[in-house]
Image: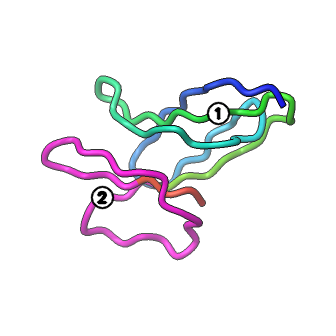
Amino acid sequence: MKKHIHKFTLMVGQNTVRSEGRIHRVLHVAFQGDKLCLWAEVDTDDSAQLNHFHVVGTGFNVPNNVARHIGSVVEDPYVWHVYQM
């Protein structure tokens, strides 16, 4: 297994991002400047894959097909919640 840390930019709503291998572990979600970013360890020995995330604000519906909560990010006055699908 050869792991590298990769950064992915997310938007509010459903996101599909291509990774250069299997995402082994999500490390962090935060704003970098005005962009919501997700950092993850990617196993680059695996083949490229599509990954699905959903970003929802506090007070909005969480889709039924989300697998797990990744993290939450404060962008005053909003709080965004990132889920893996």
Marks 1 and 2, how far apart at CA: 25 Å
Write the residue at 35% across / 51% down: 72
Q: Which mark is residue 57?
A: 2
Q: Which mark is residue 41?
A: 1
Dot 1 alpha-carbon crowd within 10 angstroms: few under 14, some 14 to 19, many 20 or more:
some
Looking at numbered disc 2 in the image, what kind of residue is underneath it?
Gly
- The residue at the far bottom in this view is 64
Q: Position of residue 39 (x, y in %)?
A: 52, 33
SS at circle 2: strand
Residue 47 located left or right of residue 30: right
- Do the residues under discs 1 and 2 have CB atoms within 8 angstroms? no
The tally of labels here is: 2
SS at circle 1: strand
Quarter of the image with the N terminus in it: top right
- Residue 83 inside the magenta-drawn segment: no
9 to 33, vertically: above or below: below
Q: Position of residue 10 (x, y in %)?
A: 46, 40
Colouring scheme applied when the structure was drawn: rainbow
Looking at this view, is 56 or 69 the one in front? 69
Q: Nearer the viewer, mark 1 or mark 2?
A: 1
Instruction: Please report the bounds of the magenta region as a residue range.
Output: 55-81
